[in-house]
């Protein structure tokens, strides 16, 4: 595996441009360590260096799974579903978008029963059912968390705006790139030539 992490000025600019740094007007206590400051209008601002460090940590956890087919990326919300699909394509993991089938992780008689080694959630609030089920069967979880997100049952939180489509696309793009860099599939120095736009949620009219 390659050592790939660095605080790129270009990455920071991308994060700012896509509003990854903008949280909500409320902040869960455990999310406060990721906050840089609070604006006058009450919006919490994320420390983007911590966002990038957690992306790297999450990527290392993902790369540590021998069989990527035993990793499951999940999004119940439309805004992240395209990003989850692209992540799955590049990484080679399972994906679940849309409605979650209750008991998928806990009920062996469920037709879609699965035993993944790792879950990656687009939003812990929207994807609360798989998050709860993962806690019953001790499956580790990675989740993209906003300032108001609860970290209950979340093992690795990636702090950032998980409600803006540009922010969501960039966060999943960065995670994908970091996993591929750590695996040695792409250069850790050269620019990754995959556009962020392909991770971007599209309306039916787009």
Image: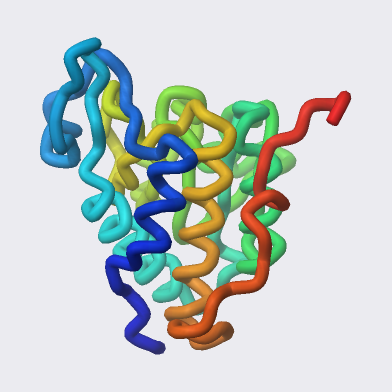
Measured as percent of width and height from the top left, residue 182 is found at 43, 80
Residue 43 image position (x, y, % from top left): 26, 19
Q: Nearer the viewer, residue 62 or 52?
A: 52
Residue 109's place in the image compared with 27, above or below, is below
Question: Residue 2 placed where, x, y %?
Answer: 39, 88
Report the front residue among 133 and 64: 64
Residue 142 left/right relative to 194: left
Q: Quadrant of the C terminus?
A: top right
Please tell me in which quadrant of the rendered image residue 81 appears.
top right
21 vs 182, left or right, is left
Whether residue 136 is visible, yes or no, is no
Residue that protrudes farthest toward the right in the picture = 205
Q: How many marks?
A: 0
In the rendered structure, the answer to whether residue 118 lies left or right of residue 67 reads: left
Q: Quadrant of residue 152?
A: top left
* Residue depicted at x 57% and y 85%: 185
* Structure colour scheme: rainbow
- Furthest residue in direction top, as rendered: 41
Q: Residue at x 29, y 50 (%)?
A: 51
| Residue 168 picture location, percent across and down | 52, 40
Query: In the rendered image, which quarter contains the N terminus?
Result: bottom left
x 53%, y 51%: residue = 172
| Relative vertical location of residue 119 with respect to residue 204 in this rendering, above or below | below
Q: Is residue 144 left or right of residue 193?
A: left
Q: Is residue 152 above or below residue 172?
A: above
User: Residue at 61% of width from left, 29% of height from top?
Assistant: 76
Residue 140: in sight, yes or no?
yes
């Amino acid at each position: 595996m390659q050592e790939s992490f660095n605080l790129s000025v270009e990455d920071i600019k991308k994060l700012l441009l896509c509003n990854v740094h903008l949280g909500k007007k409320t902040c869960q206590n455990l999310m406060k360590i990721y906050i840089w400051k609070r604006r006058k209008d009450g919006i919490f601002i994320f420390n983007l260096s911590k966002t990038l460090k957690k992306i790297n940590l999450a990527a290392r956890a993902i790369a540590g799974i021998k069989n990527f087919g035993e990793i499951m990326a999940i999004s119940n919300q439309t805004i992240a579903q395209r990003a989850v699909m692209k992540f799955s394509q590049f990484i080679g993991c399972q994906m679940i978008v849309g409605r979650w089938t209750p008991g998928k992780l806990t009920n062996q008689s469920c037709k879609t029963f699965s035993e993944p080694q790792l879950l990656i959630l687009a939003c812990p609030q929207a994807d609360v059912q798989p998050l709860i089920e993962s806690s019953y069967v001790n499956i580790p979880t990675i989740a993209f968390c906003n300032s108001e997100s609860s970290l209950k049952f979340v093992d690795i939180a990636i702090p950032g705006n998980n409600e803006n489509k540009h922010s969501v696309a960039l966060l999943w793009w960065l995670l994908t790139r970091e996993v591929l860099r750590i695996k040695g599939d792409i250069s850790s120095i050269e620019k990754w030539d995959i556009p962020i736009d392909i991770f971007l949620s599209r309306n039916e009219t787009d």
